[in-house]
Amino acid sequence: MSIREASGYATASDDDIDVTMFAGKGGVGKTTCAAATALRYASLGHETLVLSTDPTPSLSHIFELNGRQKPEKVDQGLYLAEIGLEEARQMWDEKFGREVYSVFSSFVSVSYPEFVDFISSILPGLRDEFMVDYIKELVRGGRYDRIVWDTAPLGQTLGLLQTPAMLSRHLKPAPRIYSRLKLGAETRRSVLDIVKGWEKLSREDMDFLRNVVRFALVTIPEALAVEQLDGIVGELGSLGFRIDRLVINNVIKEPSSGFLMTRAEQQRRYIEILREKYRHLPVTELPMFPREIKGMDRLRDISKGLFNGE
Ligand SMILES: Nc1ncnc2c1ncn2[C@@H]1O[C@H](COP(=O)(O)OP(=O)(O)OP(=O)(O)O)[C@@H](O)[C@H]1O
Ligand SMILES: [Mg+2]
């Protein structure tokens, strides 16, 4: 059975939709790898969306675009979307916020902005959950064959990924609380229905993250990055998520000076540690290029590095 059949994400196409999330600590090259991977998929003829949920996104900068319409066409078969905090908030408002407010406002006198602040404070991460939901809907929609998901650095990403499980825990006592409130039978029913809807949503989001999304980890051969990778691998594993590959970025391949040779030597030790620790994963060493990665040509070089020079 395919991944998609197993998770019930049927789409118009026969091929599996592939969702890859790039994760790792700050500044290691997640966005660069995500952009280069998306470029590669599009060049193979897959309709590809490269999507960022980083609150301070940099994808359009790397592709040297300045418009922000969503999704924006970058190249043949390649589309880009950036969902910042404000976009996520708006989408949450549209999909859930008003519905819940309509119930709450029938027994509490509160303005809509106050209500949103209140809900966000008792259920932190609700908007993050919406991002997972949004990507899940994109997969269901079947518009794209490949979705490459670029995320914020480590800590924020883990928060995002744990949201569905956390939301489930938050919502557990809710039916008891609401059933004790002095509400009319009808209002009580609709609050409970909405809470049940949220519980179902967080279960579905967790299933989606477990069964459909594949995680690609990016790191660099330095002490702190190696150490922090342990944390992220541990957390992803404990949530039951699948790690597909490990990219070791910024590897100095042909040191041309004493200075670079010393750095390369130091890197070698960390690369050995990483290869030993993660020997069950496909590991790719991505060379450090002399210039920052910006624009199609340099992204293609990164693509070659990520996909065996093809
Ligand atoms: N292999 C490489 N060779 C040279 N420069 C690189 C390489 N990979 C990434 N860079 C440069 O390093 C910087 C950081 O890369 P990138 O933005 O992809 O990291 P990130 O992990 O997405 O960062 P953040 O955590 O801030 O989102 C960029 O300026 C990029 O051009
Ligand atoms: Mg980034």
Image: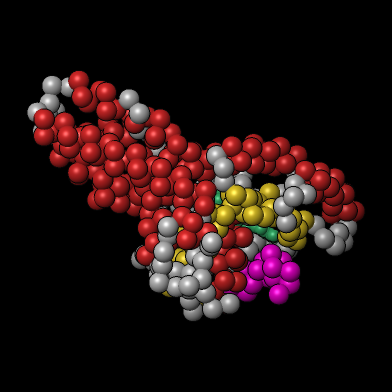
- Was residue 297 drawn as part of the magenta stretch in this picture? yes
Q: Is residue 138 visible?
A: no
Q: Residue furthest right?
A: 258
- Was residue 162 drawn as part of the magenta stretch in this picture? no
Please report the residue visible at 20 percent of the width from the left and 20 percent of the height from the top: 180
Magenta extent:
296-310
Image position of 166 with respect to 259: above or below:
above
Q: Give x and y (percent) for residue 274.
A: 77, 46
Q: For residue 141, what is the image quadrant?
A: bottom left
Q: For residue 249, what is the image quadrant?
A: bottom right
Q: Name the side, left or right, on which 175 lies relative to 260.
A: left
Image position of 75 with respect to 53: above or below:
below
Q: Give x and y (percent) for residue 147.
A: 49, 63
Please report the residue visible at 45 percent of the width from the left and 73 percent of the height from the top: 13
Please report the residue visible at 49 percent of the width from the left and 65 percent of the height from the top: 17
Q: Residue furthest front?
A: 1
Please identify the dominant SS of the magenta region: helix
Please report the residue visible at 22 percent of the width from the left and 26 percent of the height from the top: 178
Q: Give x and y (percent) for residue 24.
A: 61, 47
Question: Which quadrant would the C terminus be assigned to in this image?
Answer: bottom right
Q: Name the side, left or right, on which 188 lies relative to 234.
A: left
Image position of 231 with respect to 38: above or below:
above
Question: Which quadrant would the N terminus be assigned to in this image?
Answer: bottom right
- Front residue of 57/23: it is 23
- Front residue of 197/224: it is 197
